[in-house]
Amino acid sequence: MKIRVNGVERTLEVDPEMPLLWALRDTLGLTGTKYGCGEALCGACTVHVDGLAVRSCVTPMRRVDGKAVTTIEGLSKDGSHPLQQAWLALRVPQCGFCQTGQIMTAAALLAAKPRPNDADIDAAMAGNLCRCGTYPRIRAAIKKTAGVPRDEPGDDK
Amino acid sequence: MQVPLAIGLVLAGSACGGGTPRSHAPLVLREVPITELRSVGDFAGITDSTARSQALFGEASRVLLHPRCINCHPAGDVPHQGMQLQLHDPPVVRGADNRGVAGMQCASCHQDRNQPMTRVPGAPNWHLAPIEMAWVGRSAGAICDQLKDPKRNGGKTLAQIVEHSAHDELVAWGWQPGADREPAPGTQQQFGALVAAWVETGAACPDNPQESR
């Protein structure tokens, strides 16, 4: 099947039921996307399929045939995406395992809602777990990227 | 709230205690296991068409009120899951189009079919019922009124309600929920036949809303 991964056309001979995460990590060597729970419960494996944030651990390859997949490696080539820069500036990660999934979900949120309020952020990010508890810094980094003052709940537009 | 139990019912012309005309002789419907539905023919002994219609809806409501169905007809903004109507985990919210919010949409995890290896349920067009179609916490009679109201049934005619009940792919998931989930009672074919018979007999709703119990 053919998929466009981070802007590059790929032809993969894989089982249509293989989880996208397996293809990304084991077949294509894109190990920035992490395996967390394997059951769509933690968000560590989040990538974009045609712009939609999906859990790649439960997404079969047949669903992405002919579609565009973006992983953390494709968000920017050099870590210059505003979210990545905000993550660095605010020292968001602790252990860092969940961060690629966090950033990919946050990117999907900002693409749909450039100036999210706290409730928007909480609703979008609720499925991305961080066992280090960096949630306040994750929220702050999203607001920094969006240009929303950190100490304000954010507008509703 | 608890799941309605399938039992042998002693009725005075109507099932499930809804709108019981006093003038009719008591009728005993055959007992069925909790996993099964009575057939349309089981209600033929109810001679009053309104009472028969009410009884048919009462039987169909055993599907409507089953967790496989009402879990995605929440009265709030969070779907339910499990047999005890726990709030959905991860904590997804309804969103403007009943398909979640950016970054946390139904389709972020749910596929077009069940995923056996991960137990994540799936079916085509996976989404929440709109808030006007909320069923959780409501009686069979109240749901009956909703189903007949185009403003609260997605603008459907009764014929479309029958078709939806009998053939919709997302409705069908209720009988093939995958993993260790308990399916809705009976079959979709039986459910569709009950709804069709309910419509054919006048689509009467229980006079006294049947509280789920």
Image: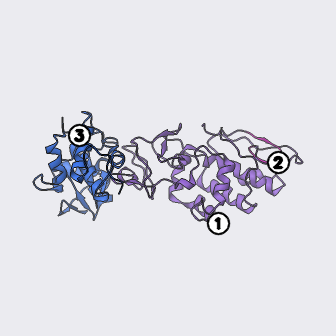
Mark toward the start of the polypeptide (2 vs 1): 2
Q: Determine whether, in the image, residue B95 is placed left or right of residue A147.
A: right
Q: Which chain is blue?
A: A
- On screen, residue A17 versus residue B30, left or right, reads left
Task: Tell me the tag on residue B159.
Answer: 1
Name the mark on residue B13.
Answer: 2
In this rendering, would B39 be left or right of B35?
Answer: right
Q: At x 36% / y 44%, what residue is drawn?
A: B117
- Which-is-in-front pick, marks 3 and 2? 3
- Amino acid carrying mark 1 in the image: Ala
Q: Name the residue nearer the viewer: B36 or A125.
A: A125
Residue at point 27%, 55% (across, down): A110
User: Hey, which quadrant is residue B102 in on the image?
Assistant: bottom left
Query: What span is in magenta?
Result: B8-16
Q: Which residue is mark 3?
A: A137
Callout 2: few (<14), some (14-19), or many (20+) C-alpha neighbours within 10 Å?
Answer: many
Q: Label 3: state its secondary structure.
A: helix
Separation of residues labelled 1 and 3 (CA atoms): 54 Å
What secondary structure is marked by label 1?
helix
Above or below — where is B18 with respect to A68?
above
Q: Magenta span: helix, strand or loop, mainly?
A: loop
In the displayed structure, would residue B27 be above or below residue B41?
above
Q: What is the CA distance from the residue labelled 2 to the residue labelled 1? A: 26 Å
Q: Position of residue B54 (x, y in %)?
A: 75, 52
Chain under numbered label 1:
B
Hue of chain B? Answer: purple
Q: Amino acid at mark 3?
A: Arg
